[in-house]
Image (cartoon, helix red, strand yellow):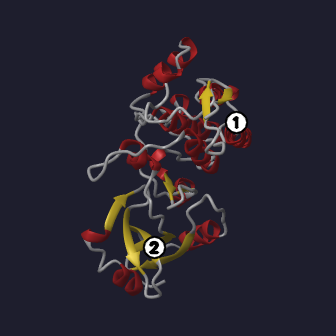
């Protein structure tokens, strides 16, 4: 893609089209000549053959739960990445709201589906990087960007601060990412997804885990915007998995493949046990038992 095409798509990178700032740089919403809506990430950087190699690698990664890279541009001291546009915003906005709208209610099964789809090694995981489409299908954004910038020497120290709650406390000084530190970050995402609250520090994560371990009342831990159509067994299994991911000892954390498998198992179990019955026999969910009432 050319600079002229992308300038036209964003009305010369107008502030009206500016939709965010990410690790790579500014993010613009654009409309290509063929009618495709895209998200364009732009940064100032000298021309680099290594950048093209990195882009070719990122372009080869395709998955229904990843935001796909569609193209790139490198002209006039600028590097740009062109991604598919995911219209429904980030999970963070759905949970916490923003200046334009409050957060929305997400059922437990919806949160499980989002968590299962987002369970991918990322190396820079946070709730704001998980986007959802019109059907709430999750798509993880910025996958591979951290590693690319590290190899290109373009990831500045400000791209991840030492007090970031998603950062594994054991790697906080070096900010040295690994698969196990990514599991911790994913666990913090699960904490936010289940509690509906922002993770403000690693101390808030510790308190959340302690509350789970000490309390028999799920409502103390879980987002009260969730309806009660879930089993206590499924909820507690999700809580245990979340606590496992944020274990202070990295060697004791699960693998991402195990996390994905467990989330899928819990989700299928919830779908089976909380399926809505025919209208004549309404279902009431109490703990992990289901009772039908005659009309």
The answer to whether residue 17 of the structure is visible from this angle is yes
Furthest-top residue in view?
214
In this rendered view, identify the residue nearer to me: 231 or 170.
Answer: 231
Compare marks 2 and 1 and give the one earlier in the sequence: 2
Q: Position of residue 223 (x, y in %)?
A: 46, 32
Q: Which mark is on residue 140?
A: none
User: In which quadrant of the rendered view does residue 230 lie?
Assistant: top right
Q: Which mark is on residue 273?
A: 1
The answer to whether residue 120 of the structure is visible from this angle is no
Left or right position of 77 against 173: left
Q: Position of residue 247 (x, y in %)?
A: 61, 25
Q: Residue at x 64, y 32 (%)?
A: 294
Q: Secondary structure at mark 2?
A: strand
Left or right position of 80 against 261: left
Q: Position of residue 86 (x, y in %)?
A: 48, 64
> What is the quadrant of the C terminus in the image?
top right
Q: Position of residue 114 (x, y in %)?
A: 57, 48
Q: Secondary structure at mark 1?
A: helix
Q: Which residue is mark 2?
A: 38
Left or right position of 112 against 99: right
Q: Residue at x 37, y 45 (%)?
A: 103
Give the CA distance from mark 2 to mark 1.
40 Å
Q: Residue at x 43, y 83 (%)?
A: 32
Question: From the viewer's perspective, is the residue at label 2 or at label 1 nearer?
Answer: 1
User: In which quadrant of the rendered view does residue 242 lie?
Assistant: top right
Q: Residue at x 60, y 31 (%)?
A: 284
101 is higher (above) or lower (below) than 8: above
235 is higher (above) or lower (below) than 66: above
Q: Give the class, few, some or many, for how many residues have Cα within 10 Å of label 2's Cα (few <14, many ≥20).
A: many
């Amino acid at each position: 893609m050319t600079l002229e095409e992308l300038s036209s798509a964003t009305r010369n990178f107008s502030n009206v089209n500016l939709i965010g700032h990410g690790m790579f740089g500014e993010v613009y919403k654009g409309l290509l000549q063929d009618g495709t809506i895209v998200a364009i990430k732009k940064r100032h950087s000298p021309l680099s053959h290594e950048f093209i190699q990195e882009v070719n690698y990122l372009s080869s990664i395709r998955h229904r739960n990843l935001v796909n890279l569609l193209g790139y541009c490198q002209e006039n001291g600028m590097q740009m990445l062109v991604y598919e546009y995911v219209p429904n915003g980030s999970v963070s906005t759905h949970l916490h709201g923003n200046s334009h709208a409050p957060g929305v209610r997400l059922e437990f099964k919806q949160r499980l589906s989002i968590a299962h789809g987002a369970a991918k090694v990322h190396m820079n995981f946070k709730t704001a990087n998980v986007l959802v489409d019109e059907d709430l299908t999750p798509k993880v954004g910025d996958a591979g960007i951290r590693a690319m910038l590290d190899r290109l020497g373009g990831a500045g120290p400000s791209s991840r601060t030492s007090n970031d709650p998603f950062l594994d406390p054991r790697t906080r000084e070096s900010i040295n990412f690994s698969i196990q530190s990514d599991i911790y970050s994913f666990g913090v995402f699960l904490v936010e997804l289940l509690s509906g609250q922002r993770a403000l520090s690693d101390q808030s994560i510790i308190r959340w885990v302690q509350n789970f371990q000490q309390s028999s009342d799920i409502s103390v831990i879980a987002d009260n915007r969730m309806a009660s159509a879930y089993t206590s067994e499924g909820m507690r299994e999700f809580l245990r998995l979340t606590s496992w991911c944020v274990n202070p000892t990295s060697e004791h954390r699960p693998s991402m493949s195990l996390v994905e498998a467990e989330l899928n198992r819990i989700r299928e179990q919830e779908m089976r046990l909380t399926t809505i019955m025919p209208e004549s026999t309404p279902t009431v969910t109490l703990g992990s038992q289901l009772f039908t009432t005659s009309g």
